[in-house]
Image: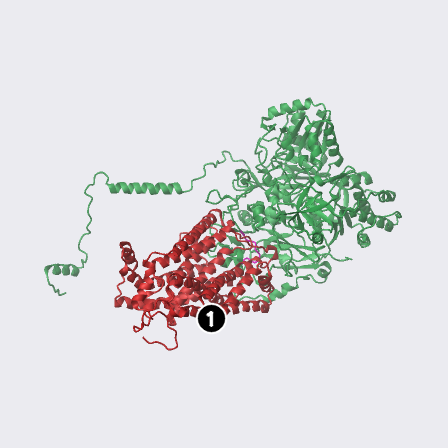
Amino acid sequence: MKIYWKGFEELREANDKATGNEFPHELPIVLNKQSKGSSRRDFLKTFGFTIAGATIAASCERPITKAIPFLIKPEEIIPGKSNYYASTFFDGELHQSILVKVRDGRPIKIEGNDLAPMSNGGTNGIVQGSVLELYDNNRYRGPLSHGEEVSWEDLDKKISEQMAGADGKIVLLSGGIISPTTNNSIKEFLSAYDNSEHIVYDPVSHNSIREANHQVFGLNSIPEYRFDKAEVILSFGADFLGTWISPTEFSFQYIQNRKPTEDNPAMSRHIQIESGMSMTGSNADQRITIKPSREKAILANLLAFLINESELDSFTGKLPESPIDIKVLAEELLNHKNKSLVICGSNDTESQMMVNGINYLLGSYGNTINFDRSLHSCQGVDSSIENLVKEMNEGKVSGIIFYNSNPAYDYSDRDAFLKGFQNLDFSISLSYTTDETSKLCQFVCPDHHFLESWNDAEPKDGLFSLCQPAIRNIFNTRQAQESLLTWTGKDVAFDDYLKKFWEENIYPLSGSDMDFRAFWNKYLHDGILEIPASSKLKPSIGSGQLLEILGSLALEKEGETELILYTPVSVGTGKHANNPWLQENPDPVSKVVWDNYAAVSPKYADENGLNTGDVIKINGKYEIPVLLQPGQMYGTISVALGYGREEGGKASIGTGRNFYPLVRTEKGQRKYFSTVEFEKTGKTYDLASTQMHHSMEGRALIRETNLDEYKKDPAAGNEIHEEIELRLDSLYEKHEFAGHHWGLSVDLSSCTGCNACVVACNAENNVPVVGKEQVKLGREMHWIRIDRYYSGDPESPEVLRQPVMCQHCDNAPCENVCPVAATTRSSEGVNQMIYNRCVGTRYCNNNCPYKVRRFNWFDFNKADSIPKNTVDPFDLTLDLPRMVLNPDVTVRAKGVMEKCTFCLQRVQEKKLNAKLEDRVLEDGEIKTACQQVCPTQALTFGDLNDENSDLSKHVRNPRNYHLLEEIHTLPSVSYLTKIRNKSGEA
Amino acid sequence: MYVSPVRETLITGNKTYKDVTNDISNPVEGKPGKFWYLGITISVIALFFGLFATIITIWYGIGTWGLNKTIGWGFSITTFVWWIGIGHAGTFISAILLLFRQRWRTSINRAAEAMTIFAVLCASVFPLIHMGRILLFFFMFPYPNTRHLWVNFNSPLLWDVFAITTYFIVSLLFWYMGLLPDLGSLRDRAKTRMRKISYRLLSFGWTGSMKHWQRHEILSLMLAGLAAPLVLSVHSIVSFDFATSVIPGWHTTIFPPYFVAGAIFSGFAMVQTLMIITRKALHLENYITLGHISSMNKIIILTGSIVGVAYLTELFMAWYSGVEYEHYAFINRATGPYWFAYWIMMTCNVVSPQLFWFKKIRRNPMITFVISIFINIGMWFERFVIIVTSLHRDYLPSSWSIYKPTIIEIGLFIGTLGLFFTGYFLFIKFFPVIAIAEVKSIIIVDRSKKQVKNADSEK
């Protein structure tokens, strides 16, 4: 190449280029002249690095230092895996055989025991909630003497001195006891003190049933009812699905012949005669409203009619006038002779005797009512506490031991009780948690919670259920039975005592051929021991006796306004009032939470110028807000008991009003209705309710039909389904799910609306409790709810119910609107929430047609990074109640959306189990929490891809439909139409 | 310059080029009046109230608002759509009217564009603050990350993110680019050292050379071309938030054109509100004449009527579709618990602009001002009706609920009003409210006439 140049520099440069050395010069790196020691620059570098490093190190999360590994691993415990222990729940009223789920040493959930013949694996809301009561902040931490902490030894010494020096009676006042071993320990205690007595006290009494059976048949017991064998059920105000005697058992039985199929379209008929709208009444095929004082007149007429029909005898005396025509009722019952069941919820011996007579004439005994396996609950005799209070005031009683009883709250004549209490020399409470009575007592000897206790139960003759601790006692408590035995002078651990009692008494009874150790282990594992019923008792009654009952009838006067006091389904008689899960569980009928109220019929309210929220004053003393309740009898007011506690804790104190003082006693029997006067106060009060609108607005959300139509056409009421299916076509391809496709089916006919699923879901999925104020704003967090609608005349409406949870749509409207893809559909058809991706735009919630998504409005769980912003009105974020949290489910922080996951953690667990065992997942193996708890088995979870699954059978059922199917969201949840039995209705 | 015999003079008062520079620069250079101080004080107080509400919201959570399980959006998204709507007039005036060669736009485009920027700024507060976890707002952007997480491109809310950021950036560029020659003038006129330095920096070395002007003109046209479709797209996309959903009252195909018309409608109403005050306070009656007010009112009649027709079409479709949910949603709008919102919307948006058919009303600044306020209120309620009234009673009556805003939500609304007016007051203090250079291109100077102090037309 020829080079042209102007000067020498250029020439040199051009040469460099030509030789390819375009950048010939070395990089001008200036070497550090001071190589020894460090420069200012070095110092700054080191300094910066240190600061940055320290900052990063300090901002990283540190490992939890409290975790302590097992030094010696217990044989059956694998960290992260749950163990189930069979046990028994009994709170003095309600019994259930249960399985306690224990995870890493902590009981976190209660399931029904599948082996239990009474509940068949179902439970109810109160039992579900009881696990939270184990971690109640208000439990006694240890024994107290005059409010001072003492040691058990000192306390025992003091108590023994007091008892030994007692000049009057020593009374053990307990709630219902169905434990044979406990009864034995009480017997021993009583025999150690001459002047001692055991009184059983039930705040809500059913003693009249025992009394009536005693008077009529000579049997002082409550028989076994068989709702499953009854074709016609006539209930006089007995809320047998909600609160009456053994509701979970009855719910299961009741629904057995209320699940008509195409092959067997039989269905029982349920007639409810009542004053207030109870949960049971809302499920009835026919509901008749009366004033409570008129109940006896109807019973008398019915009995007289049946006597005359029976040709045994004839009743010619004067009968009170019945407010309704009983002839149709009587004929319907007679048409189903031997297959009908009449029950009555009133605590009135005369009424119960007439019911006995009616059942006898209908041939119920031996068919729908059995005395072979009598129930052991409800032993409390009303007059005994009456006498006790009298004797207390007369100074005849030296001391009372309160065991699972709280008369300072729930005894009607509270003032007399408190006055008599002053005369006691000593008072001992065995309560495990603070209550009104234990606050008064000199000595508090806290019992274990039942999940920490050994015990047994005999709910029915020959049916035993064991109770074992699922956790070591958290606090310095001692089992009540052990306290009693200590005071008897026996130093024995109660588990040894229990074992010994079983070895001596129950083992021989069982006739088992195992040795006792094996026997004990087996039944401790199973939880249930059933001994064949001993005799076939067939009670009989003479016609003369029946006439006598009718002849000597004492009728109540009809009042202008009558007040009915009932036990609420959600919180019960008040023992569980401090349970936030239960308080926030909506009433099955009114959907009100955190309160009791005066239910008044719309017409009666209108005539008296009342509206929902107006406060009235009953009998010039008891203020209560009004709620317009469709289906309430005109001229009556219903108020729930169990509210208005003065002690207990944040959830119970000041929640609702105590109406036990309005329970009246007549002829030694407590009556739960009375004639009252009321006046308006001009004040108003805001009730919190989870549902504000009560009409379905003519939309085909709940599809229902009548049995007669169903027999003609199984798709009756669901005709629109086929039409919509035909119409729905899409440009897009149908979603394919290769493996499983999870789905859930809800039988609307079976759902009684008991809300047990709501509590079970709370427990399983760590759903926070938000409190009354937030519910008022419409912010309850429940993942499952039961929608309740009324139809027809507001004075006697029909009630429709529909459990609604996330529908897990294949075409989910929530999914495509999320900007950050925080909610997606899994390969198994489950609509999932990814909490840590969620930014909380709430767009998914807006676009959900079912409104099942729940937003964390505040930091309800103390899971947020910002300090001091937790909204936790009931201290559920303290360390103790947090122990109930399910470690398999994320605790959600503020600002995150959440919703039903189909209990994904359960699905995953069972899938992994099947994989480990190298087998195919079985249908029915996975049960969601709501399904497992359901006493009527209204929910079925399963695989839609499995043609033989129970779920697929439901989906193929002509009754099957999807909620809002016309908008083509393709839900995985489907519903079966509701069927009522209106046949033969007048 | 050619003077049309039929067209109204755009700038009255026989202004010379010097007059124009003086008239418009004087408020910037002089001391602000009592009115300005009062205004900015109130605005800043409102702004701080909003700041307080923001802190409370972030600290305690969205629970401090009145929303619930049924109604997930309330005051905040209503106000968001309202501000976005208001933000439409500026770009419409500067871009679309530029392309249509509407020369009267020059007197109002600067202020309208500034208004757009502040309105979009106010609007963007709400999508951020309404998030449950605001600290994670960046999840909304498709940024590469080690977890391979990507945004959901199906979500209209994501489209909003793109639409609004694009709109904001283009509007800001357009506005600032238009300011450059005037900032150059201010720099040249500046007396104090501070002013000299700051305007020198702000004017980006504008010299007024022919090359600068040429580039300025080309860029104007290009940005106008870019911004014009944005005027139509932004509110269409905002309307998709609702239109693509399944909620009765939201799921409507008419939404995009209806929202765009509504946006321009409300935007012009806000321009009227501001300009009528500004022209009075800054004595710019010769620049913003009754002709301008009248022209804007004509656009208001047009867009207002489109909105009115859209309302009626919605009602017709609710009946004609035969969908019971849709049917109920519209009956509920008119007769349900929020009936007042519906009727405020109807009266303010449909009835009140029809008064502008009368020339006397159209050319009356006082009445125009009042009606423009009505329209602002009506358009806020329109969004409230769409959002809250549709949500509060949707498919399942069991979940029907009621919504009451809390003081915190109202505080946020007031806060954005504070932000908007603080911005506007600072703008009129430090920048020329009227595009000096552009106005100069349309004035007609008759040197034979003596200067008249006040606008003759207003006497």
Pointer 1 local density, CA inside 10 Å: few below 14, some 14–19, many at least 20: few
The secondary element bearing badge 1 is classed as helix
Residue B439 colored in magenta in the image: no
Return the residue at label 1: B360
Whether residue A322 is visible, yes or no, is: yes
Chain where mark 1 sits: B
| Drawn side of residue B156 relative to residue A127, left or right | left
Quick one: A435 or A608, which is closer to the camera? A608
- In the depicted structure, whether residue B255 falls above or below residue A89: below
Q: Can you tell which quarter of the image residue B162 is in?
A: bottom left
* Mark 1: amino acid: Lys
Quick one: A570 or A765, which is closer to the camera? A570
Q: Colour in which chain B is shown?
A: red
Q: Main secondary structure of the magenta part?
A: loop
The boundaries of the magenta stretch are: A847-854
Q: Quadrant of the N terminus of chain A?
A: bottom left
| Drawn side of residue A104 relative to residue A655, left or right | left
Q: Colour in which chain A is shown?
A: green
- In the depicted structure, whether residue A891 falls above or below residue A515: below
Q: Position of residue A281 (x, y in %)?
A: 71, 51
Quick one: B417 or A46, which is closer to the camera? B417
Q: Position of residue B249 (x, y in %)?
A: 55, 63
